Amino acid sequence: MSRKSKELAKLIRERAGEAPVRLGLVLGSGLGHLAEAGNGTAIAYEELDGFPHAGVSGHNPKLVIAELEGVRLAIFGGRAHYYESGRADAMRLPLEVLRELGADSVLLTNAAGSLRADFPPGRLMLLEDHINFAGINPLIGEASDRRFVPMTQAYDPEIRKALRAAAHEEGMVLREGVYAWFSGPSFETPAEIRAIRELGADAVGMSTVPEVILARFLGLRVGAISVITNMAAGMSDEPISHEQTKAMAPIGAEKLEKILRRYLRGL
Ligand code: HPA
């Protein structure tokens, strides 16, 4: 862990209290308001030297240390995307800090386009695996042999099982699928969407995958959920836009919050 992450963790503990954090929650586009849940200590990313600026609208760039359903969480109200800076490791420091605060796992959320007619907008998809279609890796340049991170079962089977059970208890079915990462920021072409559907993808988005790689590198267990905000390019007559993502995300966010709360109660 870097010296910087230790310093930041110290600062956060001074502000939010010494008790260790149990898990991290990274909020995706249009889901930032979940950072308001709980009665926590909020620290703007700007105050955390080296944290990303997370300038994408629909994000809420602050770290909130909060107790939710009796579990101490670090909620990241916004994330940095590769397309903002050209740096795939933009979320490395926040994840290092999370580890430093004591967490052993992280739940990642995102907004995504669906490649499947049976995953319409407003639904959630639990990630069972991913395809790194962007072809970029946040560990490029990492010097130690630790860079050769296994990505088999990167999405923790126990966390997935617990999230599915939590959804079931809330009367929902949380279907699993494969998420394909495109760099963005332009949306995909219909031909790209047809291609990755053939390759086995069920949803597409511009985030999460670099964080999964970094989290596994840091020894964090990972769970991830997509909020489906639109049908992917070429799959519906509706034009794709970031506005659509922001408008649809809150519908999925309500379901997400119920599942998360139930999951936390079971920890
Ligand atoms: N493509 C990529 N990223 C996305 C999409 C999409 O269709 N929807 C929300 N994020």
Image: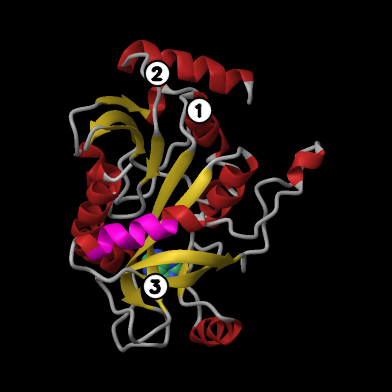
Q: Which residue is mark 2?
A: 12
The span picked out in magenta is 160-168
The mark closer to the camera, 3 or 1, is: 1
Tell me if label 1 and label 2 are in contact, CB under 8 Å: yes
Disc 3 secondary structure class: strand
Disc 1 secondary structure class: helix
Residue 87 got which mark?
none
Q: Which residue is mark 1?
A: 97
- Dot 1 surroundings within 10 Å: few (below 14), some, or many (20 or more)? many
Q: Is residue 179 left or right of residue 66?
A: right
Q: Residue at x 29, y 43 (%)?
A: 264
Query: Is 166 in the magenta?
Result: yes
Q: Is mark 3 within 8 Å of ligand 1?
A: yes
The mark closer to the camera, 2 or 3, is: 2
| Closer to us: 263 or 118 | 263
- Disc 3 versus disc 1: distance between alpha carbons? 30 Å
Q: Residue at x 19, y 34 (%)?
A: 38
Looking at the figure, which quarter contains the N terminus?
top right
- Dot 3 surroundings within 10 Å: few (below 14), some, or many (20 or more)? many
Task: Residue 139: give x, y in percent of width and height.
Answer: 70, 45
User: Counting residues from the N terminus, which is met first, the one under dot 2 or under dot 3?
Assistant: 2
Q: Is mark 2 within 8 Å of ligand 1?
A: no
Task: Residue 232: give x, y in percent of width and height.
Answer: 41, 79
